[in-house]
Amino acid sequence: MDLAALEASLGVSFKDRGLLRLALLHASYANEHPDQVEGSNERLEFLGDAVLECVVTEELYRRQPGLSEGDMTVLRSALVSGQRLAQVARDLGLGAYLVLGIGEERSGGRERESNLAAVFEAVLGALFLDQGYRKCCQVVRRPLGVELRRLGRQGAPADAKTQLQQLLQTRGGSPPRYRTAEETGPDHDRRFTVEVCAGDQVLGTGWGRRRALAEQQAARQALVGLQERASVLSTS
């Protein structure tokens, strides 16, 4: 694996490449090869998620002094959404470096949004341990800096849950309901899968370490589906 090319893409040079290798190691591979590796990137992902939120919060605080706490919360959620982080991972080419188990590889895990978002966070966690917070700030600013400035100028957009509720209201439909479909992981690292429904219909599904994040992702998926459906109907 050519880690030098990945480091060039990230704009960093790891002192301990073992941390970078661990950040790329998916749980599916660790589960299939317990005698070859000790653990996966999940703990680094957990750390990287916290570092990312801190970096983005600091950037918003410094760049946008006029924003309220509520506006910063909405903007931060938009910037660190699974969809956006997955795109950052694609731009960096992280998917090609993921070390996956056979089943995960065959099922398209290298392009799965949740895997891509997670590996970016894991790499960030590894970098934090290797070189500290300020280096993480530099890496995060590169892909998210333009968005930080753009969103700051435009102001806080309505979050996905608000947009979905407004859309369903304008169509005279039932208000959205959110239900937890699954909870996994230990108490210190819970994973939530949430479905958003209107009536008996499931409109979208989301995942996240916090229920609120999973609800936002489910709402975003529902919005995309409803918009695509409306587009098909308008052209038929």
Image (cartoon, grey):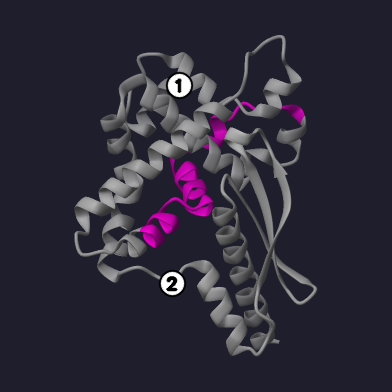
Q: Which amino acid lies under the numbered mark 2 shown in the image of this protein?
A: Ala
Question: Are circles 1 and 2 on residues that touch, CB within 8 Å?
Answer: no
Q: Is residue 199 left or right of residue 189?
A: right
Inspect the magenta stretch and tell me whether residue 116 lies in it.
no
Q: Decide which of 67, 83 is in the foreground and name it.
A: 67
Could you say which is closer to the camera, residue 223 or residue 186? Answer: 186
Residue pointed to by mark 2: 158
Up/down of 114 relative to 231, above or below: above
- Bounds of the magenta segment: 73-102
User: At x 55% / y 61%, what residue is drawn?
Assistant: 216
Q: State left or right for residue 214 relative to residue 53.
A: right
* Residue occupying image coordinates x 64% and y 87%: 234
Disc marking residue 3: 1
- Residue 16 percent coordinates (x, y): 40, 13
Instruction: Give the amino acid at mark 1.
Output: Leu
- Note whether residue 81 is visible: yes
Position of residue 169 relative to residue 32, above or below, is: below
Find residue 144 and report its horizontal and vertical position in percent: 34, 49
List x then y, in percent, for residue 110: 63, 38
Q: Quadrant of residue 158?
A: bottom left
Marks 1 and 2, how far apart at CA: 40 Å
Say what secondary structure mark 2 lies in.
Answer: loop
Would you say the magenta stretch is mainly helix, strand or loop?
helix
